[in-house]
Amino acid sequence: MKKFVKILAVVMIVALSATLLFACGGQEDTGREKLIMGTNAAFPPYEYYEGDKIVGIDAEVGALIAEKLDMDFEILDMDFNGIISAVQNGVVDIGMAGMTVREDRLEHVNFSTTYAKGVQVVIVKEGSDIKTLDDLAGKLIGVQEATTGDAYASEDYGEENVKRYTNGAAAVAALQSDIVNAVIIDNEPAKAFVAANEGLTILETAYADEDYAIAVAKENTELLEKINTALAELTADGSIDAIVNKYIPA
Ligand code: GLN
């Protein structure tokens, strides 16, 4: 019986290694450490799918940071709501998801220096009677669960008027099918969703300005320092600007 268990264990390990190898697209083992980034890839132009590949500003900046750190790089796609705990539990090394630095998040993770700015905006259908932020009162607002848009909408218009979705694309789809009357989301994804879908528009009045940064586990201070150094270098040599300009043409 013991022998059987041993054999079973070996078979499982072999199977697991094969799966891991397969999951890495058959990449050979470079012997280097790997930097794993957790994100929610429904947030263009920061992270989204092009075919089966996750691309975008965060994906590219993350890859450059890994390169600077002489590490391999992998992206794990998950609900935005799960990213902070994935960082805390070590499922991923960094959380990079157009993530706003917030006091309540700082209780759970550390943030790198900021590498981008965001603004919360409101998307409505063209011709909607919602013209200003005040008009949102009593309307049903779609948000991405656990985002700053969720927090603002819930605080300012009441929980009962907020409908939460696991990602921005789902919230926008709900707006298109008139399930919600508006969506509060970051400005660049808002622009991308409006460009990709007929009949949507962004209100001129915007919500608060925000800073995006990379989330790192509290105890992982060495990694945080390395990331900050890498970010400073990538800012100084224009790499980050070049990536941003590629995805957000002026
Ligand atoms: N910037 C927002 C936040 O951090 C939304 C991020 C996202 O949905 N990926 O809450």
Image (cartoon, rainbow, N blue to C red):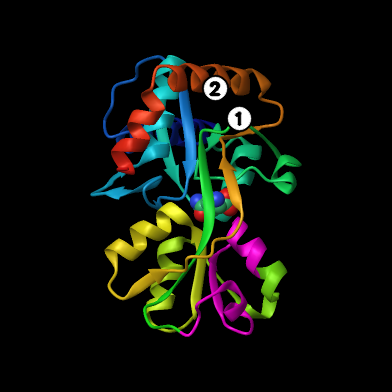
Q: Nearer the viewer, residue 179 or 235?
A: 235
Q: Position of residue 217 (x, y in %)?
A: 66, 32
**Residue type pointed to by label 2:** Ile
Residue at position x 49%, y 44% from top? 97
* Residue 24 location, quadrant: top left
**Above/below status of 137 relative to 32:** below
**Above/below status of 228 relative to 134:** above
**Residue type pointed to by label 1:** Ser
Using the rendered image of the protein, determine whether residue 15 is visible from the camera's viewpoint.
no
Q: Tag 1, which secondary structure?
A: loop
The magenta span reads 129-153
Disc 2 target residue: 227
Residue at position x 43%, y 14% from top? 70
Q: Tag 2, which secondary structure?
A: helix
**Above/below status of 144 relative to 2:** below
Q: Nearer the viewer, residue 243 or 167?
A: 243
Q: Position of residue 7 (x, y in %)?
A: 45, 32
Asked whether the residues under the numbered discs 1 and 2 touch, taking CB atoms below 8 Å apart as contact, a structural biologist would say yes
Quadrant assignment for the C terminus: top left
* Residue 168 location, quadrant: bottom left
Disc 1 target residue: 112
Quadrant assignment for the N terminus: top right
